Amino acid sequence: MQTLVASDGLELRYVVDDYTDPWRKAETLVLVHAAMGSSRRFYAWVPHLARHFRVVRIDQRGHGETGIPSPDQLSFPRLMQDVVELLDHLGVDKAHLAGSSAGGIVSQGMAIHHPTRVRTLASFASVPGMKKVATDYAGWVSRIGAKGVATFLRETIADRVDVATAKPGFVDWFIAESARTPVEVLARFVPMMATVDLQDDLPKIACPMLVVVPGADPLHPAEEYRPIAERVPGCEFVVYDGLPHNITDAEPDRCAQELKRFLLKHAA
């Protein structure tokens, strides 16, 4: 894992997986994880993608191995700035971006506010901001604070994973991995993300966009995803019928293959 010191002094950690032909310059793909996630949650995506692209997996602020931000070091613009500074650090003018859930919202924000840095955008289980959604995120924070991340996820796992079809051991791994995120980070991260609303700015997304939606998402019903299809010209909108929220974890091979197909279609 490699380190980048952000412009505000926080240490950001990231991983690079590159199995492209060494005699050609590969395009860069940045993967941005969900809340309670980390770069490790994209482990199964790497074999599908790293032969064709230089895959960069960032740990967002307060997640994974990246440092815990102070109160004035955590904001939505700052999360986007971290991606910009990572691209600068890597010497990349323009990258493909793909994000899961909250990471997809960050990626959408990048395509809106930093369009010259984004080649393509892929959004998995990501609504256009959490401000206008039905999910009680304040209730989340209260329950996580009272019970801890692991217990909260164990009690709400059906919102995220189809337990009946999950591979043996997956649910325990998913919960343990997610519980590595400190409660105090989520107590600030979730309310901050709940203030974000990108709906009015969606028409500014000019790059090719893939939207992959879980068709039976208890956290976000279909109408919360629909504005993306309606407001982003030419976006590719794909629904995975019957699946709850965490498709990027429960169906990593399917999601990675979907992304690979999309990227190869639009790669230079």
Image: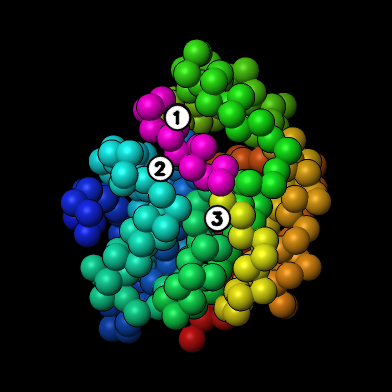
The CA span between labels 2 and 3 is 13 Å
**Circle 2 SS class:** loop
Query: What's the mark number on residue 203?
Result: none
Depth check, mark 1 against mark 3: the one in front is: 1
Q: Are marks 2 and 1 in contact (CB under 8 Å)?
A: no
The CA span between labels 2 and 1 is 17 Å
Q: How crowded is mark 1: few (under 14 residues within 10 Å), some or many (20 or more)?
A: some
Residue 17 visible somewhere in the drawing: no
Task: Return the disc, 2 or 1, that comes first in the chain's sequence.
Answer: 2
| In this picture, residue 226 sits left or right of residue 45 | right
> The magenta stretch spans which residues?
182-195
What amino acid is labelled 1 in the image?
Ala
What amino acid is labelled 2 in the image?
Ser
Q: Quadrant of residue 85?
A: bottom left
- Residue 55 is one of the magenta-drawn residues: no
The residue at which mark 1 appears reads as: 187
Residue 132 visible somewhere in the drawing: yes
| In this picture, residue 41 sits left or right of residue 135 | left
Residue in view at x 27 percent, y 71 percent: 88
**Circle 3 SS class:** helix
What amino acid is labelled 3 in the image?
Gly
The residue at which mark 2 appears reads as: 38
Task: Estimate the x, y position of residue 155 in percent, counting from the top left.
Answer: 62, 18
**Circle 1 SS class:** helix
Residue in view at x 61 percent, y 75 percent: 204
Residue 64 sits above or below residue 144 on the image: below
- Residue 184 is one of the magenta-drawn residues: yes
The residue at which mark 3 appears reads as: 104
The CA span between labels 1 and 3 is 20 Å
